[in-house]
Amino acid sequence: QLRRGESNILKKSHLLIILTIFSVSFLFPESIFLEINNFNIGERAFHIDSGKNYAIIADYQGTIHFVDIFTLEKTEFTQSTLPMGGAYDGEFFYVIDNYNKEVLKIKNNKVIQKLVLDSKPVNIKLINGELYILGTNPYKLYILDNNLFVKKSMVLPVHSPLIRNIGTQVFIPVFDNFQNDVFLTDLLFLIPHNDTYIVNYNQIEHPIDIVGSNGIIYMVSYYNGNLYRNDFRKQPKIAQFGKYTTNIEMYKNYIVGNSLMGGVYYYNLSSGKTDVILEKVPISDISVSPNGQYLYAISHIENKLFVIDGEDVYQTINTYNYPIDVESPTDNIVLVLCTDSSKLQVIRNFE
């Protein structure tokens, strides 16, 4: 429920948005991106979870923020100690509490069910109606249904905090596979659906993300930014995406990736050629609009959001301090989480 006074503020906010839409449509006949709202988020919030019409952000002060991206209403859940993320299936919210090793099922801001795990949950994602949860101490993967029944649990060989997917196919990067010049495992990605792995045939270190195109899988490594193609018993390096690459995405006829050292990199699937834009701009995250028209890139150093069309920067927008995560849940909405400012920025594309 809204706090006292928030209802009037919300009504004024909605009126302002309507007036903005009319004025923008009149002044700018072409598409333009504008901030329509921002929300205060607690300190040390690093990630946006998207579910249906909600953005879900956990902060290290113990609060989960649920933001409806259409109505711009925000509710807060404070009954967890150290929330690390959440999911929403259209009826229930699911929140992981790292401190208490719990998964909480929430409706109307009340816990209606909880499950205690035997490891500390660090990540949660709802894919194809199932909850995928990763934990540490010990390193484990859990797959739950919406009644919090554990359908499957698996021990992971090393620290593996990320959940990736190609459509409904889930992949868990075996991230900390290399330490002190030694490979700790010969595995790159867990495929939990059929209990199989992508095996490491090319001494690939620290796999972090994966995409697929025309039945072929491509993988990127974090520290050296190498892009690999997963062939049968071969994994040739096909591109270099700078260094410290955190994400790759499919965009038009490209695989695109970001570098924390600078640049948005494009690998052309037809020609095999690699190009780069914003080469001297450190990029902390990228996201592609659901319709595939725009690529969004944020710089945590320059405090900018770059709206990219093809290989051209279409528009540059100022963000708050240290943008760390960008998400595009709909064709017209862009979300930017700025850690140092404790802000969630909501940006809309006016066409």
Image (spheres, rainbow, N blue to C red):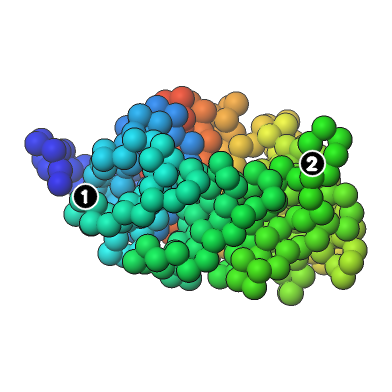
Labels in figure, total: 2
Q: At 72% across and 31% down in the image, what residue appears?
A: 261
Residue 35 in the image, given as x and y percentages of width and height: 38, 41
Decide: few, some or many residues near mark 1? Use Cα within 10 Å; few <14, some 14-19, many ≥20. some
Foreground of the two, 240 or 289: 240
Quadrant of res 70: bottom left
Please determine whether, in this image, residue 43 is positioned above or below residue 11: above
Amino acid at pointer 1: Asn
Q: Is residue 70 visible?
A: no
Amino acid at pointer 2: Phe
Residue 38 in the image, given as x and y percentages of width and height: 34, 37
Q: Is residue 272 left or right of residue 285?
A: right
Residue 212 in the image, given as x and y percentages of width and height: 70, 66
Instruction: Give residue 178's mark.
Output: 2
Foreground of the two, 249 or 93: 93
Residue 285 in the image, given as x and y percentages of width and height: 59, 42
